[in-house]
Amino acid sequence: MAITEAVGQVRAWLDRSVTEVLHVDPSDIHQALIWLEEPGVGANLTTDAQIAAAAFRYGAIVHTADMDFQRSPLRSMNP
């Protein structure tokens, strides 16, 4: 996907009334670190773990096709 197409898609999501931007709390970072330490992985899962931790605290559902989100107790949905 070209960057202009990706930017357009993100802007379209942000324009939807159901989209909520979550704010990260220090506790989210601690939770993400716990989830990364348990299986002993990191690298490309680091950002996923941070997103999952914030969403988990908010009780949110993350809409994603990324199967890595199933590693956490987070509610996720493949759009």
Image (cartoon, helix red, strand yellow):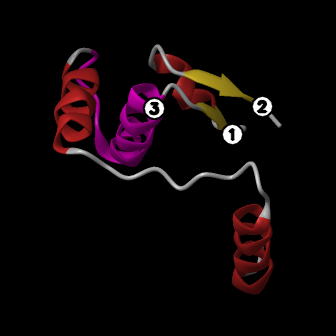
Of the pair 40 and 49, the residue shown nearer to us: 49
Q: Which residue has dot 1 on it? A: 64
Q: Which residue has dot 2 on it? A: 78
Apparent side of residue 64 relative to residue 22 in the rendered image (left or right): right
Apparent side of residue 63 relative to residue 34 in the rendered image (left or right): right
Q: Percent from the top left, x then y, of residue 77?
A: 73, 27
Q: Which residue has dot 3 on it? A: 58
Q: CA distance from mark 2 to mark 1?
A: 5 Å
**10 above or below 72?**
below
Kindly state the secondary structure of the residue where label 1 is placed: loop
Range covered by the magenta-colored residues = 39-58
Decide which of tag 3 and tag 2 comes sooner along the chain: 3
**Mark 2 and 1 residues: CB-CB less than 8 Å, in contact?**
yes
45 within the magenta span:
yes
76 within the magenta span:
no
Q: Amino acid at mark 1?
A: Thr
Kindly state the secondary structure of the residue where label 3 is placed: helix
At x 20% / y 23%, what residue is drawn?
A: 34
Q: Percent from the top left, x then y, of residue 69?
A: 54, 28
Apparent side of residue 39 relative to residue 8 in the rendered image (left or right): left
Q: CA distance from mark 3 to mark 1?
A: 17 Å
